[in-house]
């Protein structure tokens, strides 16, 4: 321990004597360590951290697959048949993200994100309300009591976290509903949902009881203990084959895709984040190679010192230990700089991330991130210092130092120059790989931006709305409203055309259904 402390104190004295060199190395390593720490924090929060539900790895999302295309949406009749026939899950629930017109007593009406769910939804998640109770089966039947669950955020924002909120009535899409429970903040599927209403009357709606209509619902299930994913797939494949036999018009070639809830939630972000983490790793390798080259060049000026210490009895191990201690101290100092850089980088990534990006805003520099930063700092110090220490304390290097004449100065031997040249080659190779990848990415992005869309998006405006079923309870009423809306929008000065659609281009809506062309069979 005394030897280690002596090495640390000696390294600090040397670094204090060379402030320019010390600052440059700290900044170079700090940039690499900071970028890796920020991206690791993101990967840990988005991909590695489990969902906040009991045994979250057992939660699965069931998606319908049509002719090898995953549609995602499940029809209500198919869901009921899956639930009645399956043997692999404790139960299956139906859930769909929705938007509601929300009115609360004495407050301005707002547009609220929410979800339509079956009564067993919370049971499958393994979550219970923090206040009140769960939805009942009676409330999830046509004509049942109008009930609603509210999320933690809405409870705080609209009711000031009042524990007496149970029994209060709010109006959702023109329907007065009684608050029967308040959910914990861990319930965040669908994303940002603040009100949860039961399926209820939709079970008897003619648009929903059509087996060929897929109205945007997802099916959520929890695997039974001991049941594997492969066994569940086989079970559901058999059910889908039976439904295809019974309902060929609607279920031909329809199968089921099972995905863990975490995988479904993060989607394509998993691959993108790992690619970014790999790119950050390359940046750190370039930084370490650069620092190794700097240390090798600096060590050549100390060869005579090392020779004298060796002549006085210092072993190669002791000399290498001193040099590695110096590089480790530099790595730790670079790690401190890296934490500052990581704060900035992480804040920038969160600010630039899409609003609906799953779990991005939960990323923090927590204990795992700090441990990762410390490991990166130690690893960077050793990686950048090991080869220079091994090279400069070798017998050949020592002998060359003894033979060095005043005519050659401190320029180093030919072998030393080759090593530095090799490190430069490694740096250039890594940089070329990074630049090539970045160039290809920019080229693909530019080509995607230039792809013809068939319309001018800069001249297109969209507005989202939904009609409350309490007032527009028939297709005829809805058609009259939509016709008047389109006519009124067309009359606005500067508007050349107007239309209404259930799905806007590139909205990501996965609902699908049948349609009929007037005048045809």
Image: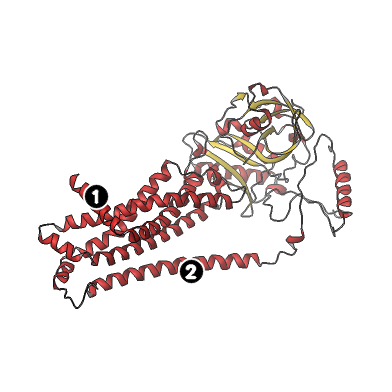
Report x, y in % for residue 201. Answer: 75, 32
Q: Residue 74, position in %: x, y?
A: 66, 43
Count residues near mark 2 (Cα–Cα under 10 Å), then give few for <14, some for 14-19, many for 20+.
Answer: few
Residue 280: tell me if it is visible.
yes
Residue tagged by mark 1? 9
Name the residue located 36 percent from the left edge and 47 percent from the top edge.
374
Q: Residue sitting at 42 percent across and 52 percent down?
A: 338
Q: Residue furthest left?
A: 312
Q: Quick check: 340 left or right of 356?
A: left
Is residue 185 shown left or right of residue 138? left
Q: Cα distance, mark 2 to mark 1?
A: 43 Å
Secondary element at image label 1: helix
Answer yes or no: do the residues labelled 2 and 1 have beta carbons within 8 Å? no
Q: Residue 248: image x %, image y %?
A: 70, 48
Residue 305 appears left or right of 434: left
* Above or below for 314 versus 203: below
| Residue depicted at 70% across the width and 34% down the height | 199
- Asked whether 389 or 406 is in front, the reply is 406
Residue 258 visible within the image: no
* Numbered circles on residues, count: 2
Front: mark 2 or 1: 1
For label 2, the SS is helix
Q: Identify the residue under disc 2.
A: 436
x and y percent of residue 431 in the render? 43, 67
- Which color mode does the image show? secondary structure
First reached walking from the N terminus: tag 2 or tag 1 = 1
Q: What label sits on residue 261 in the rendered view?
A: none
Q: Quadrant of residue 112?
A: top right
The local crowd at label 1, few if under 14, some if 14 to 19, many if 20 or more residues have their Cα within 10 Å, is some
Which is more toward the observer, 470 or 337? 337
Q: Quadrant of the N terminus?
A: top left
What residue lies at 89% left-to-right and 54% top-to-bottom? 491
């Amino acid at each position: 321990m005394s030897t280690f402390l002596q090495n640390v104190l000696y390294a600090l004295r040397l670094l204090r004597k060379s402030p320019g060199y010390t600052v440059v190395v700290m900044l170079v390593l700090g940039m690499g360590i900071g970028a890796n720490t920020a991206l690791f924090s993101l990967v840990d929060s988005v991909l590695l951290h489990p969902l906040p539900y009991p045994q979250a790895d057992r939660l699965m999302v069931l998606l319908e697959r049509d002719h090898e295309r995953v549609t995602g949406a499940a029809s209500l009749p198919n869901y009921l048949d899956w639930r009645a026939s399956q043997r692999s899950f404790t139960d299956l629930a139906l859930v769909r993200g929705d938007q509601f017109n929300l009115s609360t007593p004495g407050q301005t009406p707002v547009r609220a994100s929410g979800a339509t769910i079956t009564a067993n939804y919370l049971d499958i998640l393994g979550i219970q309300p923090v206040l009140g109770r769960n939805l009942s089966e009676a409330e999830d039947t046509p004509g049942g009591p109008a009930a609603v669950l509210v999320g933690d955020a809405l409870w705080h924002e609209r009711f000031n976290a009042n524990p007496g909120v149970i029994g209060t009535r709010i109006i959702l899409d023109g329907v007065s509903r009684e608050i029967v429970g308040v959910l914990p903040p861990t319930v965040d599927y669908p994303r940002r949902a603040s009100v949860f209403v039961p399926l209820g009357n939709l079970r008897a709606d003619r648009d929903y009881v059509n087996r060929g209509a897929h109205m945007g619902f997802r099916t959520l299930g929890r695997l039974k203990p001991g049941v594997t994913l492969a066994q569940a797939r086989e079970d559901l494949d058999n059910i889908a084959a039976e439904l295809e036999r019974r309902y060929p018009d609607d279920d031909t070639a329809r199968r089921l895709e099972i995905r863990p809830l975490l995988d479904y939630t993060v989607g394509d972000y998993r691959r993108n984040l790992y690619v970014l983490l790999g790119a950050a790793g390359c940046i750190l390798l370039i930084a370490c190679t650069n620092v190794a080259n700097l240390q090798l060049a600096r060590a050549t000026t100390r060869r005579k010192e090392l020779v004298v210490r060796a002549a006085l009895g210092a072993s190669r191990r002791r000399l290498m230990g001193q040099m590695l201690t110096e590089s480790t101290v530099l790595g730790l100092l670079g790690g401190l700089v890296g934490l500052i850089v990581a704060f900035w980088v992480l804040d920038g990534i969160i600010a630039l991330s899409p609003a609906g990006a799953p779990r991005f805003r939960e990323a923090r520099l927590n204990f795992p991130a700090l441990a990762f930063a410390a490991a990166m700092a130690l690893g960077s110090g050793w990686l950048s210092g090991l080869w220079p220490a091994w090279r400069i304390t070798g017998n050949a290097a020592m002998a060359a130092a003894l033979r060095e004449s005043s005519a050659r100065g401190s320029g180093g031997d030919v072998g030393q120059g080759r090593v530095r040249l090799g490190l430069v080659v490694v740096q250039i190779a890594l940089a070329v790989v990074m630049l090539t990848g970045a160039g290809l990415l920019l080229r693909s992005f530019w080509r995607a931006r230039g792809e013809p869309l068939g319309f001018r998006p800069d001249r297109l405006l969209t507005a989202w709305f939904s009609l409350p079923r309490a007032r527009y309870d028939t297709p005829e009423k809805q058609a009259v409203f939509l016709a008047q809306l389109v006519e009124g929008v067309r009359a606005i000065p500067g508007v050349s055309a107007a239309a209404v659609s259930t799905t806007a281009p590139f909205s990501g809506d996965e609902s699908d259904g049948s349609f009929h062309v007037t005048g045809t069979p």
